[in-house]
């Protein structure tokens, strides 16, 4: 893998806690040759200040960020995305290698180093055959909400089968490492945190406060209670969302949703749910993350690494509502750049460069708004799933000679067809074959595979490999289809856009590493999202997560100069 390294000429610029006096000692100044040798270090790619693991790892996942947003939107000097692009090790060609590309599977794959076929999170919600109903990936009725009286905290990671890098960090440190995970969405906080974190926190959008589950604690930490008591969401509801500057977009489209009753700026949110459809959601998340660092003294245990997992959910909510071409989305990233800039400045003041490692990525991308491209002649649209299901039911009734009152298909979710459990084994086998054959004749369905095929030895085709990597017989359907590029669900998303496909607009995401001995560099080699967890495992000296299978990113590991064997007392 070829990496093009660029020297970091000013090591004092963003880490003032590491002073010029600390680096250029009088001893070095008296020895010109040694001084020259020291300066040459800053022209070597991927050189670390220390051979010790970082004291704090910060994982930042931006929900629904396509990789091309790094180049498409304009970021300014002083902003966080600008700074990461200037100082980070950037993998420009990072991809998800499975179907479906949703938030739950995405976060699970980042932190387990595995795909849904191995970690178990096959979708945000799947059809649970044993319950005969849809099942939300982190739902858990055996626990209670901590922080409010609502049911929003009845959540846990029990459906996640594989261990995460955060699990392995806790295990390797004999549970002395602190792991804290924060996100507006519950699944985006719970899945990165693993099975035994210090705490996972998410936002109750009905009550406007941060909460957790009794799976993690009996009471909210005091610092979270104090943060909630400040009632920041109430103050933010009084502030309209304004368009700060002109963008290369049109601020009104019939394909956009509404916030504050309007599709155009300014937007005045009228509820906590609408507040999260603005950049205020990212601000709340980063403020709580900063408070967690202070209150929990993250990164301050000698010889122990702590982990802060942050997921920024508002870009996804805004993208779904307004689409990928909207002024709202472009303004979101304009503001996010500033918000991340303030957060990284705080990290730089709080920690020395060799003490912190940050990675930034996304849990999936997003499809272009179909109507925007269709107006330019592209073959895109919204697929009428309800009509497809009704026609498929009628076809199977006819071919299997079933009564008109029967429903041989029990559910259709995430492009998965689930057959009724009352069908016999022979009927199911026949129904799968018939349904696949019929689906492949439908307009804008490019591929269809049966459960038997996906559970088999495999195939070499790109679509098959993607579907097989996300297939779990226990939770996946009997027949899975793939829509043509540019086609999304019509009923679920009448406006805006969505994601979930095998196509590059959904799989291609940013991946940037920053901190420690990492030097600015660019790689265009294709890497899988599942490489993140094993890379962290080697840097942190933990076991590999239980289902991780990808090779680590050696450039990141070498930047830390982590020795293979540590001297023991």
Image (cartoon, helix red, strand yellow):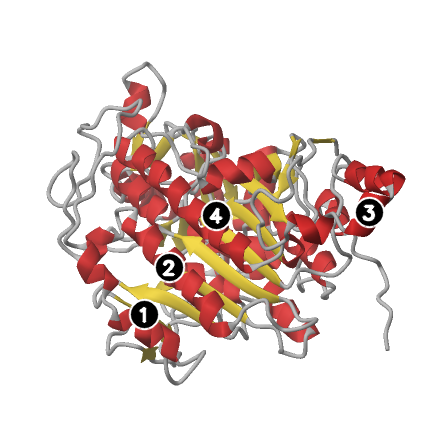
Q: Are marks 2 and 1 in contact (CB under 8 Å)?
A: yes
Per the rendering, the mark at residue 287 is 2
Specify the quadrant that holds the C terminus. Answer: bottom right
Residue at the disc numbered 1: 227
| Residue 37 as seen in the image, left or right of residue 166 | right
Tag in front: 1 or 4? 1
- Return the residue nearer the eye: 4 or 40: 40
Q: Residues within 10 Å of mark 3 (few under 14, many from 20)?
A: some
> Residue most toward the top?
377
Sequence-wise, the earlier of marks 4 and 3 is: 3
Residue to which mark 3 is pinned: 28
User: Which numbered disc, 1 or 3, marks the residue closer to the eye?
Assistant: 3
Report the Cα–Cα distance between label 4 and label 3: 46 Å
Near mark 4 (Cα within 10 A), the count class, few <14, some 14-19 or many ≥20, is: many
Q: Quadrant of residue 31?
A: top right
Mark 1 surroundings: few (<14), some (14-19) or many (≥20) residues within 10 A: some
Left or right: 450 with respect to 182? right
86 and 330: which is toward the camera: 86
Camera sees residue 489: yes
Picture coordinates of residue 72 (x, y %)?
Answer: 43, 27
Asked whether the residues under the numbered discs 2 and 3 touch, taking CB atoms below 8 Å apart as contact, a structural biologist would say no
User: Height in image: 304 above or below 46?
Assistant: below
Residue 363 is labelled as: 4
Residues under labels 1 and 3: Cα distance?
47 Å
Q: Position of residue 561 (x, y in %)?
A: 79, 52
Q: Is residue 434 visible?
A: no
How dense is the environment of label 2, judged by Cα within 10 Å: few (below 14), some, or many (20 and up)?
A: few
State which mark lies toward you, 2 or 3.
Answer: 3
Q: Earlier in the sequence, mark 2 or mark 4?
A: 2
Q: Which one is nearer the viewer's eye here, 53 or 400?
A: 53
């Amino acid at each position: 893998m070829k990496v093009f390294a660029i020297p970091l000429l000013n090591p004092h610029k963003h880490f003032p806690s590491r002073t010029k006096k600390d680096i250029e000692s009088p001893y070095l100044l008296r020895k010109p040759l040694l001084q020259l040798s020291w300066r040459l270090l800053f022209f070597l790619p991927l050189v670390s200040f220390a051979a010790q693991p970082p004291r704090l790892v910060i994982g930042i996942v931006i929900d629904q960020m396509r990789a091309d947003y790094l180049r498409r939107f304009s970021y300014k000097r002083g902003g966080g995305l600008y700074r990461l692009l200037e100082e980070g090790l950037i993998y420009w060609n990072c991809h998800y290698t499975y179907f479906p590309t949703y938030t739950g599977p995405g976060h699970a794959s980042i932190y387990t180093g595995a795909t849904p076929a191995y970690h178990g999170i096959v979708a945000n919600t799947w059809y649970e055959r044993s319950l005969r109903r849809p099942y939300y990936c982190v739902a858990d009725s055996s626990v209670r909400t901590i922080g409010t009286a609502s049911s929003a905290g009845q959540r846990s990671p029990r459906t996640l089968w594989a261990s995460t890098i955060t699990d392995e960090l806790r295990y390797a440190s004999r549970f002395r490492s602190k792991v804290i995970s924060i996100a507006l969405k519950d699944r985006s906080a719970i899945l990165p945190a693993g099975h035994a974190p210090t705490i996972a926190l998410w936002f109750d959008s009905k009550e406007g406060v941060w909460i957790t589950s009794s799976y993690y604690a009996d009471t909210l930490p005091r610092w979270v209670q104090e943060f909630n008591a400040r009632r920041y969401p109430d103050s933010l509801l009084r502030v309209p969302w304004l368009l700060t500057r002109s963008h290369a977009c049109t601020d009104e489209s019939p394909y956009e949703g509404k916030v504050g009753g309007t599709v155009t700026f300014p937007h005045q949110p009228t509820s906590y749910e609408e507040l999260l459809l603005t950049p205020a959601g990212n601000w709340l998340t980063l403020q709580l993350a900063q408070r967690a660092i202070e209150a929990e003294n993250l990164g301050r245990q000698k010889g122990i690494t702590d982990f802060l997992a942050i997921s920024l959910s508002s870009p996804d909510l805004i993208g779904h509502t307004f689409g990928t071409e909207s002024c709202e989305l472009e303004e979101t990233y304009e503001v996010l750049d500033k918000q991340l800039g303030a957060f990284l400045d705080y990290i730089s003041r709080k920690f020395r460069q060799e003490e912190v490692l940050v990675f930034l990525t996304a849990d999936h991308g997003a499809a272009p708004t179909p109507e925007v491209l269709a107006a330019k002649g592209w073959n895109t649209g919204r697929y009428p799933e309800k009509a497809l299901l009704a026609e498929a039911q009628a076809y199977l009734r006819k071919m299997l000679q079933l009564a008109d009152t029967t429903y041989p298909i029990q559910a259709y979710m995430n492009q998965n067809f689930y057959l009724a459990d009352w069908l016999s084994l022979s009927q199911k086998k026949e129904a799968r074959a018939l349904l696949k054959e019929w689906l492949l004749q439908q307009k804008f369905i490019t591929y269809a595979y049966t459960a038997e095929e996906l559970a088999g030895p495999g195939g070499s085709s790109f679509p098959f490999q993607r579907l097989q990597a996300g297939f779990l017989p226990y939770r996946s359907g009997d027949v899975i289809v793939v829509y043509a590029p540019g086609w999304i669900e019509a009923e679920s998303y009448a406006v805006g856009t969505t994601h979930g496909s095998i196509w590059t607009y959904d799989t291609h995401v940013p991946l940037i590493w920053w901190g420690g001995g990492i030097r600015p560099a660019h790689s265009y080699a294709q890497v899988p999202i599942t490489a993140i967890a094993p890379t962290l495992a080697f840097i942190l000296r933990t076991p590999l997560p239980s289902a991780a299978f990808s090779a680590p990113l050696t450039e990141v590991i070498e930047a830390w100069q982590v020795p293979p064997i540590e001297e023991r007392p």
